[in-house]
């Protein structure tokens, strides 16, 4: 089986279909390690990626005023038990442009491997980017997954991100996002993670609301079982009049897993406001008993509560 | 004499040696709507939790039978599988779970639309909604009742089913309670609202964890409204005639 076939075979695990590669109207990049296996672009979109021995390096540019109708699919992965994938990428969404990126990170057999993404994203004034990153890992764990990004959101621009890692055991996951939001801009960061076995999860999301009336939401949902552990930090700083931020973190801990949640809110202007809520613990007793009173056994009830929370 | 659907004898539940339910007796017959009245703190909701088997609500004495089966050794879901269910006064919210899923719990083949229509909600608008904070209290209450309807229980304990429901919709709630009976079920109806209590076949009044009156709903409501508590003279429950 080729590397491309191996990656496409597990693509449905993150909710996408291999047929996207055949769609002439859908842009995509598929890379195994530091090798590009397939790519297509569409009008208004430039994808410039260079293969080097140590990394995939390049940029993705959505031209000013362009709306990319179909989501841009970026499939990155490793098809072998060991290996390294380093991606250094500069994403630019020019003024008034709109795009959706679906990033599929696929590591079906990885056992001692590393996937590192270093991204700089610039969302120019009036532009919008929706970035959805879905991970699929096999059952072995043992990976290091390091998505780090700096995102700059211009005047009146909008950025939505949704990170999910719901299948398999990852090993070590270390997410570090820094987001800066200018006047009237909006950032919504959502992360959903299910940790198993000995997974070690570190998630740090920092939002700096620099501009007037800038807004942000950090929403994190983490479920841990086995011996997994997680440290979740959501930071929001508000520096300007009318800036509004909210941090919402919920973690369910089962078995011998353990977790910490650290919401940090800082306000530097009297007319700014940042709020936070955080909850860690077992499954809510009332939710559990309500479902059991409808006839579900405890295992079925927990499964429904957890799957709902991770949607 | 038929076996009562619910037969409670000498039920006692204590917290820190203080009796919340005190040697309580109650019988609900099959096909009966039985209203339970009582002042705040008289033990109505505690009785509901003890009957359902909620965590921390294990009685210290007494017996409870549902259709002849001893309930007390059973877990919540085992009681539910026997045909008992509870609609909480403040229903839980579930992030991500849709109304459709909630109304089809454990029965994926079940059509949730009739139950939703039964509580006056448009399936087209509500089936894909999530049971989270975006629903109002009244909407969530109706969906709770719809989930009870869809379960077709032998005995539904409804704890203040009309709480938070707008005035114009009270009759709708009354219709739902009657529908449960018409479906062959029984209802233990905890309520403070006279117009809701009066649809019952029988009614009882609780005071400080004990049954102090049983009779027709009219008699029970009048008893509750018109007299100082006969058991404690108002010293325990604070219920005295104004």
Image (cartoon, helix red, strand yellow):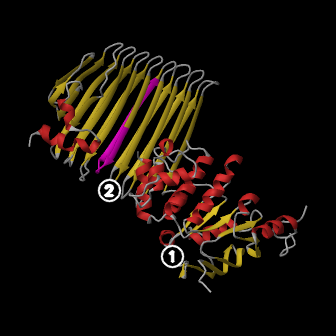
Toward the viewer: A128 or A118? A128
At mark 1, the secondary structure is loop
Return the residue found at the far left.
A1
Magenta stretch: residue A164 in it?
yes
Snapshot quadrant of residue A256: bottom left
Residue B8 in picture, x, y percent from top left: 64, 79
Residue B161 in picture, x, y percent from top left: 65, 57
User: Which of the labelled discs sits on residue A246, or is there none?
Assistant: none
> Is residue B39 toward the left or the right of residue A289 in the image?
right
Q: Residue at x 52, y 49 (%)?
A: A279
* Residue annotated with mark 2: A197
Determine the chain carrying the residue at label 1. Answer: B
Which quadrant, please, contains the C terminus of chain A?
Answer: top left
Is residue A285 visible in the rendered image? The answer is no
* Residue annotated with mark 1: B74
Residue A55 in picture, x, y percent from top left: 20, 29
Please tell me whether residue A57 is drawn above or below residue A33 in the rendered image: above
Q: Residue at x 83, y 76 (%)?
A: B231
Which residues fall within the magenta stretch? A163-180
Toward the viewer: B170 or A287? B170
At mark 2, the secondary structure is loop
Q: Residues within 10 Å of mark 2 (few under 14, many from 20)?
A: many
Toward the viewer: A240 or B164? B164
Snapshot quadrant of residue A228: bottom left
Helix, strand or loop: magenta stretch: strand
Determine the chain carrying the residue at label 2. Answer: A
Is residue B190 visible in the rendered image? The answer is yes
State how many labels appear.
2
> Is residue A140 toward the left or the right of residue B164 in the image?
left
Task: Report the Cα–Cα distance between label 1 and label 2.
Answer: 33 Å
Q: Residue at x 31, y 21 (%)?
A: A68
> Is residue A23 toward the left or the right of residue B231 in the image?
left
């Amino acid at each position: 089986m080729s590397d491309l076939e191996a990656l496409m075979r597990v693509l449905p695990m993150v909710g996408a279909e291999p047929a996207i590669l055949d769609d002439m109207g859908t842009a995509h990049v598929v890379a195994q390690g530091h090798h590009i296996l397939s790519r297509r672009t569409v009008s208004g979109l430039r994808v410039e990626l260079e293969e080097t021995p140590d990394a995939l390096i390049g940029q993705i540019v959505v031209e000013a005023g362009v709306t990319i109708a179909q989501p841009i699919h970026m499939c990155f992965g490793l098809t072998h038990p060991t290996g390294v994938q380093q991606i250094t990428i500069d994403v630019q969404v020019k003024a008034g442009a709109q795009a959706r990126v679906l990033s599929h990170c696929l590591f079906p057999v990885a056992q001692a491997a590393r996937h590192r993404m270093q991204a700089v994203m610039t969302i120019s004034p009036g532009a919008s980017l929706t970035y959805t990153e879905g991970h699929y890992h096999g059952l072995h764990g043992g990976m290091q997954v390091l998505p780090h990004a700096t995102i700059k959101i211009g005047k009146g621009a909008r950025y939505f991100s949704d990170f999910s890692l719901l299948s398999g055991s990852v090993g070590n996951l270390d997410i570090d996002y820094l987001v800066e939001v200018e006047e009237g801009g909006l950032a919504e960061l959502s992360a959903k993670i299910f940790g198993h076995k000995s997974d070690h999860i570190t998630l740090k999301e920092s939002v700096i609301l620099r501009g007037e009336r800038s807004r942000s939401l950090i929403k994190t949902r983490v479920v841990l079982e086995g011996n997994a552990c997680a440290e979740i930090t959501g930071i929001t700083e508000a520096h300007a009049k009318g800036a509004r931020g909210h941090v919402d973190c919920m973690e369910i801990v089962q078995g011998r897993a353990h977790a910490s949640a650290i919401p940090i809110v800082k306000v530097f202007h009297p007319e700014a406001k940042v709020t936070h809520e955080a909850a860690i613990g077992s499954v809510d007793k009332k939710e559990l008993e309500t479902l059991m009173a409808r006839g579900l056994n405890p295992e079925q009830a927990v499964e429904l509560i957890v799957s709902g929370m991770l949607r | 004499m038929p076996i009562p659907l619910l037969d409670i004898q000498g039920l006692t539940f204590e917290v820190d040696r203080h009796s919340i339910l005190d040697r309580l007796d109650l019988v609900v017959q099959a096909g009966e709507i039985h209203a339970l009245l009582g002042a705040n703190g008289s033990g109505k909701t505690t009785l509901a939790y003890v009957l359902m088997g909620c965590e921390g609500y294990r009685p210290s004495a007494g017996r409870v039978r549902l259709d002849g089966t001893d309930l007390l050794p059973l877990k919540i879901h085992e009681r539910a599988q026997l045909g008992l269910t509870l609609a909480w006064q403040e229903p839980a919210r579930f992030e991500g779970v849709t109304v459709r899923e909630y109304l089809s719990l454990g029965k994926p083949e079940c059509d949730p639309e009739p139950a939703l229509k039964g509580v006056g909600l448009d399936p087209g608008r509500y089936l894909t909604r999530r049971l989270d904070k975006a629903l109002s209290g009244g909407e969530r209450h109706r969906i709770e009742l719809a989930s009870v309807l869809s379960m077709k229980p032998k005995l539904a304990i409804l704890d203040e089913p009309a709480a938070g429901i707008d005035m114009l919709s009270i009759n709708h709630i009354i219709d739902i309670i009657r529908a449960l009976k018409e479906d062959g079920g029984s209802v233990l109806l905890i309520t403070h609202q006279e117009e809701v209590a009066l649809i019952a076949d029988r009614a009882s009044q609780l005071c400080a964890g004990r049954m102090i009156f049983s009779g027709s709903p009219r008699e029970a409501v009048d008893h509750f409204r018109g007299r100082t508590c006969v058991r404690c003279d108002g010293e325990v429950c604070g219920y005295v005639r104004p």
